[in-house]
Image (cartoon, rainbow, N blue to C red):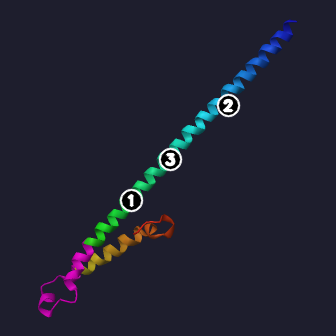
Amino acid sequence: MQDSWLSILGSLASIGAAIWAYFEAKRASRHASKAEAVRDELIQRRAIVEVSQVYAESSRILDLVSSLGPACTETRVRGLNVSDIAENVEKYSRFLNEHSAHFNQGLQNTA
C-alpha cells in the first residue's frame, strides 16, 4: 500500500513539475520575443544613424565640389586646392562603399 502512495505522489509531483516547466517555457518564449524586438529596434536605429551620416557627408562633399561647378572660371580654379578636393571625393567614394548596404531595395529607405 505504501508503494502505491509513493507512486501516486511521485506521479503528481511529475505532473506538477511538467505544468510548471510548461509555464516557465511560455514565459521564457515571451522574454525571448521581447529581446528580439529590442535587438531589431537597435539595428534599425543604427541603420538610420548611418543613413543620416551618408546624408551629412553627401551635403559636405557637394558643397566642396560646387566650387568646380559651371560658374567656375579660370581665375577661380587657380585659387582652389584641386588635389584636396580630389582627395575628399576619393574618401567620400570609400565612405559610400562602406555604407552601400543602405542602398539596398530591401531596406526601403530613401538613401
- Label for residue 22? 2
- Residues tagged 2 and 3 counted as in contact (Cβ below 8 A): no
Sequence order check: which comes first, mark 3 or mark 1? 3
Horizontal side, residue 28 vs residue 108: left or right: right
Query: Where does residue 89 sit, x and y in percent of width and height?
Result: 29, 78
Q: Residue at x 40, y 56 (%)?
A: 46
Q: Crowding at label 2, few (<14), some or many (≥20) Cα neighbours within 10 Å?
A: few
- Label for residue 74? none
Instruction: Give the answer, above or below, for where 91 lies relative to 71.
Output: above
Query: Where does residue 42 sit, x and y in percent of width and height?
Result: 43, 51
Q: Residue 60 is drawn in which quadrant?
A: bottom left
Q: Does 64 appear in magenta?
A: yes
Distance of label 2 from label 3 (alpha carbons): 23 Å
Q: In the image, what residue type sits under mark 2? A: Tyr
Q: Residue 102 is drawn in which quadrant?
A: bottom left
SS for tag 1?
A: helix
Sequence order check: which comes first, mark 2 or mark 3? 2
Q: In the image, what residue type sits under mark 1? A: Ile
Q: Residue at x 78, y 14 (%)?
A: 9
SS for tag 3?
A: helix
Q: Quadrant of the N terminus?
A: top right
Distance of label 2 from label 1 (alpha carbons): 39 Å
Q: Does 67 appear in magenta?
A: yes
Q: Which residue is mark 3?
A: 37
Q: Which portion, as a residue range, is magenta?
A: 60-84
Q: Residue at x 29, y 67 (%)?
A: 56
